[in-house]
Image: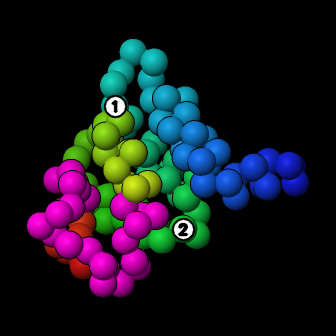
Amino acid sequence: MPGLVATLKDPKKFREVYRYVFMFAKDSEQKCMPLEVACAMLQTVLKGRPHEERFVEFLETKRPVKVINKDQWYNFLDFSETIAEDLSNYDEASSACKSCLLSWILCL
């Protein structure tokens, strides 16, 4: 287990694992992950990382979508790694946020 923890501290390796989780957690016949599964996976994989808790709470209470697609999944990691928790460095004009993520930001 210590080896895995060390591996996940490497941002490149973590990104690989995060992307794999999407493929692992969705039904092999589907292109999207059900919202409930996505929330559980976000809570597991991103526990304690910026925005995870508030984003999952938003998804569970507002339910803006029924599924999370691969682009949304990947974009949330990019967002959580680059945008400060207080959103002080968020620039709406240059952001490539998908609608679900943007809806969440606007609710804050």
From the viewer's side, name the closer residue of 76 and 57. 76
Q: Nearer the viewer, residue 42 or 86?
A: 86
Is 14 on the left-hand or right-hand side of 105? Answer: right
Position in image of residue 55 (x %, y %): 37, 65
Q: Amino acid at mark 1?
A: Cys
Q: Main secondary structure of the magenta part?
A: loop
Q: Residue 30 colored magenta? A: no
Left or right of residue 100: residue 22: right
The quadrant in which residue 21 appears is top right
| Crowd rating for badge 2 (residues with CA inside 10 Å; few <14, some 14–19, many 20+) | some
Q: Residue at x 20, y 72 (%)?
A: 91
* Residue beneath disc 2: 49
On the image, the x and y values in percent for residue 102 come to: 19, 62
Q: Is residue 104 visible?
A: yes
- Give the magenta-colored segment's residue range: 79-101
Which type of secondary structure does the marked residue at label 1 adopt?
strand
Judge the density around disc 1: few (<14), some (14-19), many (≥20) Cα neighbours within 10 Å: many
